[in-house]
Image (spheres, rainbow, N blue to C red):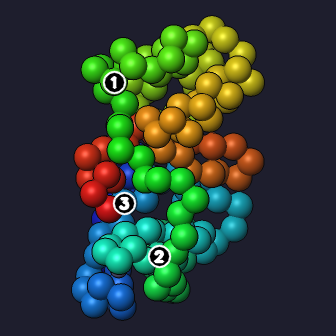
Amino acid sequence: MSKVDETTDTATIQTFCHSCQQDIQVKLPKAIVENAHSYPVSHAYLHGDPAHVLILYVDRQYLVRGTELSETVTIERPPQTVPLNAMVLLRVPRRYRETAMAMLKLRQAMASDVAILTGKSQNAESNYLGALFRLGYLQRVRIQHSYQYSIPTQNDMRG
Ligand SMILES: [Zn+2]
């Protein structure tokens, strides 16, 4: 079962994880489902201790059509630990600050949305958002050929 809250950008998907041996809730950005070219859409959910990956196959109605489990995972970068907020903003390198401020306002956006706020080119914002992601201030999901960035919540941090 899944809950699709009309007031947020996120759907809460309820499913069972055979590694955790319990029902879990996966928060899925609706844009992943709504902008998909084909269904079901796959989404990898990294969680637990030891960490493992549950891949969900979600259809257009946010129903889970299948899952796959990987008991082991290798993460190339350390997990993000510093979600962007007003205090963190002061530590962000000066050239990214305008972009970071736009993200604080938007919470979830693509480079084109940020470019409208900052008046810079989409290309420039794409680079700046990528840098903020690598610095650990933002998280991102790939949607077709572009990325959507968002500010991690404390919940995402625990994973
Ligand atoms: Zn699990």
State the SS at label 2. strand
Q: Position of residue 126 (x, y in %)?
A: 67, 29
Closer to the camera, 141 or 31? 141
Mark 1 or mark 3: name the one nearer the start of the chain. Answer: 3
Q: CA distance from mark 3 to mark 2?
A: 14 Å
State the SS at label 1. helix
Closer to the camera, 126 or 13? 126
Q: Is residue 26 above or below residue 108?
A: below
Indicate the quadrant of ligand 1 in the picture: bottom left
Mark 2 or mark 1: name the one nearer the start of the chain. Answer: 2
Amino acid type indicated by mark 1: Val
Amino acid type indicated by mark 3: Lys
Q: CA distance from mark 2 to mark 1?
A: 30 Å
Amino acid type indicated by mark 2: Val
Q: Residues at badges 1 and 3 in contact (C-beta under 8 Å)?
A: no
Q: Residue at x 64, y 51 (%)?
A: 143
Q: Residues at badges 2 and 1 in contact (C-beta under 8 Å)?
A: no
For label 3, the residue is 27
Q: Is residue 99 above or below residue 12?
A: above
- Using residue 128 as the reference point, say whether residue 64 is left or right of it: left
For label 1, the residue is 88
For label 2, the residue is 53
Picture quarter with the N terminus: bottom left
Mark 3 or mark 2: name the one nearer the start of the chain. Answer: 3
- Using residue 68 as the reference point, say whether residue 23 is left or right of it: left
* Structural crowding at the residue carrying mark 3, measured as other residues with C-alpha within 10 Å and reported as few (<14), some (14–19) or many (≥20): some
Q: Quarter of the image holding residue 40?
A: bottom right
